[in-house]
Amino acid sequence: MGWFTKKKKGETTDEEPMMQISAEADETEADALQAKEETPEVPAQTAYTEEQNEMPEEEPEEASAPQKKGFFARLKEGLTKTRNNISDSFNNLFKASELDDDFYDELEETLVMSDMGYETTERIVEDLKARVKEEHIKEAQACRDLVINIIRDQMQVDETAYDFENKKTVVLVIGVNGVGKTTSIGKLAAQYKARGKKVLMAAADTFRAAAIDQLKTWANRAGVDIIAQNEGADPSAVVYDAVAAAKSRNTDILLIDTAGRLHNKKNLMDELAKMRRIITREYPEANVESLIVLDGTTGQNALEQARQFSSVTEINGIIITKLDGTAKGGIAIAIQSELNVPVKYIGIGEQIDDLQKFDPNSYVNALFADFDMRSDVEILVDENIENIPKDDDLFDMN
């Protein structure tokens, strides 16, 4: 496909300059202090007496807090940048009259712009061509829902994807630094606890004291127990203790936080393999679920991380975080389509309920919401419908 030789423009962000404190600020503060010393203080009793003669002012009623939007509304809002990236092209594309090479080239460009990736885009376009031929479709507009359904098919999650939540399970949460592993564990723990599960956390990221403290904070917030040792402790020892505690306490789900690691750091990957061996040896009756956390704002880099991790360790599912406000929302489709690993949870904010199970239908609906398939004439008529005279008005001679 010739279009793939084009280069994509990189996004740039403006950095605000750092503010510097000048000497004038000190002089101003000194003048203010001097003025305060020279100004005589008003006796408190005098001020009180004057206020007694005044009618007390009624305190304004506090505005009621705005009702929190539902998850779909927040997801739709979070994917606004992605939707804006492709909306004009998508709308104009399906108003074309012919299904020619230009149509398919523009469709490819539109999908890649949403970060669906080349392989996924090619698969979608080839599938569309086959269905167009099979169903004898002649007009572009008739392909709109067909394209969306094909994309939805790329993202379906098997019914058994969440069976682990109803078994004795040890969940290993892995990924690079800064993607939201610890926060995701905290949110999952709170949600499992709210559903009546007995949950235990383990702080196996012993490289950073801050990681241990952060997980303890989430444990307190979620109301669950945590197994932790000091910074620098052997992560495998933490896992061993956590597994023993999970067995003795009849825990339903053990969530293990691990250190951020890269796939090419052999010692860290060996450590991860050691943790899995301990779990399977000490707790053979438990289900082991390995979830990789990916930052949704990194687009194709997230896909590459998942691909590299899957080459060296087993991955059972994916958590995509930070989808609120990203312009790369199509990456969820690319990851699942290309790796055949299900996206199980997505995050769109900092609150506990901002991490939810992945629903392909809701995601696609949010991604392609607000696309207007009416023609320009239909839009003009609809927007001015109230100004169009009715039949009776046309023949009113009064």
Image (cartoon, helix red, strand yellow):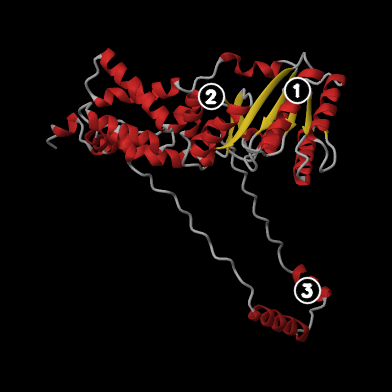
**Residue 268 placement (x, y as % from top left):** 70, 36
Q: Which residue is mark 1?
A: 277
Q: Which residue is mark 3?
A: 47
Q: Residues within 10 Å of mark 3 (few under 14, many from 20)?
A: few
Amino acid type for the residue under numbered disc 1? Arg
Is there a contact, CB below 8 Å, between mark 3 and mark 1?
no
* Circle 3 or circle 2, nearest the eye: 2
* Circle 3 or circle 1, nearest the eye: 1
Q: How far apart, in angstroms, are the residues tagged by discs 3 and 1? A: 75 Å
Q: Nearer the viewer, residue 353 or 82?
A: 82
Q: Residue at x 82, y 24 (%)?
A: 243
Is there a contact, CB below 8 Å, between mark 3 and mark 2?
no
- For marks 3 and 2, the one nearer the N-term is 3
Residue 359 disc label: 2
Judged from the image, the secondary structure of the residue bearing numbered disc 1 is helix
Q: In the picture, which quadrant includes the C terminus?
A: top left
Amino acid type for the residue under numbered disc 3? Ala
Judged from the image, the secondary structure of the residue bearing numbered disc 3 is helix
Q: Can I make out residue 301 in this image?
A: yes
Q: In the picture, which quadrant includes the N terminus?
A: top left
Judged from the image, the secondary structure of the residue bearing numbered disc 2 is loop
Amino acid type for the residue under numbered disc 2? Asp
Q: How far apart, in angstroms, are the residues tagged by discs 3 and 2? A: 63 Å
Q: Nearer the viewer, residue 395 or 88?
A: 88
